[in-house]
Image (cartoon, grey):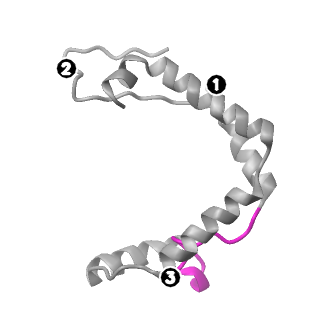
């Protein structure tokens, strides 16, 4: 956060949940999925050359998350549209279900932690 944002954490949180509320009222939008999928497809298609060791480590991790047919593309591509899943995720984003931790180099060692 900026210094202003850090001084107004509660207002920032309110704005985030106002936006989530707007998304919930509009419902899942397939055009957003299509746009994100297109960006992911382009990102995968035009991948820059990586250090072979870094790529091998990434690939090993992806092999734990994706089926064999998606080992190379799974981290970049978005496949199916599922409005019910989007709605389920939006429904879980509530103030009662949030955890906020604010950290800043401006906080000193003697600053106390509070839980609300």
Residue sitting at x 75%, y 64% = 81
| SS category of the residue bearing label 1 | helix
User: Which residue lies under the disc numbered 1?
Assistant: 96
Q: Looking at the image, which is closer to me, 17 or 114?
A: 17
**Circle number at residue 108:** 2
SS class, disc 3: helix
- The residue singled out by tag 3 in the image is 45
Quarter of image, res 83: bottom right
First to last magenta residue range? 66-81
The mark nearer the N terminus, 3 or 2, is: 3
Q: How crowded is the residue under tag 2: few (<14 C-alpha within 10 Å), some, or many (20+)?
A: few
Q: Secondary structure at mark 2?
A: loop
Q: Is 107 contained in the magenta span? A: no
User: Which mark's residue is nearer the viewer, 3 or 2?
Assistant: 3
Tell me if residue 17 comes above or below residue 58 in the rendering.
above
Residue at 62%, 25% (x, y): give it. 95
Neighbours of disc 1 within 10 Å: few (<14), some (14-19), many (20+) = few
The reply to whether dot 3 and dot 2 touch (C-beta < 8 Å) is no
């Amino acid at each position: 956060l900026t210094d202003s944002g850090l001084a107004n954490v509660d207002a920032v949180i309110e704005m985030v949940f106002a936006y989530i509320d707007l998304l919930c009222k509009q419902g899942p939008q397939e055009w957003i999925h299509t746009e994100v999928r297109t960006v992911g497809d382009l990102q995968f298609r035009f991948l820059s050359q990586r250090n072979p060791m870094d790529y091998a480590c990434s690939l090993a991790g992806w092999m734990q998350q994706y089926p064999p047919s998606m080992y190379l593309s799974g981290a970049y591509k978005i496949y199916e549209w599922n409005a019910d899943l989007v709605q389920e995720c939006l429904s879980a984003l509530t103030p009662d279900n949030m955890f906020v931790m604010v950290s800043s180099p401006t906080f000193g060692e003697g600053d106390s932690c509070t839980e609300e």
